[in-house]
Image (spheres, rainbow, N blue to C red):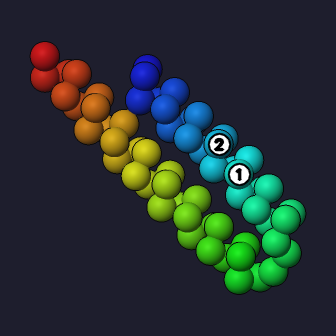
Amino acid sequence: YEGLVVVVVGCVVVVVSSGIVVEVVEGIVVVVVVDVVVVVVEVVSVTIALIASSQVDQF
């Protein structure tokens, strides 16, 4: 379950930080950039979690 926890925590941190960024700097460009970053971070987190879980299954 460690992988899932990492993904959830990562998403929460990204959402919170992105919310702060959007509030501090208002603008469509910033929102778009933040959204892209969120998607990238989520994809990377899920990928890492899948790799970690597959490695655990091998042992």
- Residue at 36 percent across and 36 percent down: it is 49
- Against 9, is 41 above or below? below
Q: Quadrant of the C terminus?
A: top left
Element carrying mark 1: helix
Question: In the visual, does 48 lie left or right of 24?
Answer: left
- 10 Å neighbourhood of mark 1: few (<14), some, or many (≥20)? some
Q: Residues within 10 Å of mark 2 (few under 14, many from 20)?
A: few
Q: What amino acid is labelled 2 in the image? A: Val
Residue at left offset 80%, top offset 56%: 20
Quarter where residue 32 is shown = bottom right
Q: Residue at x 34, y 47 (%)?
A: 47
> As displayed, is residue 34 above or below residue 11?
below
Question: Which residue appears farthest toward the top when viewing the image?
Answer: 59
Q: Give me the residue at 71% from left, 51% from top.
A: 17
Q: Which of these two is toward me, 24 or 11?
A: 24
Percent of width and height locating residue 14: 63, 50
Q: Nearer the viewer, residue 5 or 27?
A: 27
**Is 22 left, or right, of 34 in this rendering?**
right
- Which residue is disc 2 drawn over? 13
Q: Give how far across and how far down residue 6 sits, in percent.
A: 49, 32
Q: CA distance from mark 2 to mark 1?
A: 6 Å
Give the secondary structure at mark 2. Answer: helix
Q: Are marks 2 and 1 in contact (CB under 8 Å)?
A: yes
Residue 9 image-quadrant placement: top right
Amino acid type at mark 1:
Ser
Furthest-left residue in this view:
59
Q: Which residue is mark 1?
A: 17
- Where does residue 37 sit, x and y in percent of width and height? 55, 64
Residue at the far front in the pictured view: 24
Instruction: Check the picture and name the quadrant holding the N terminus.
Output: top left
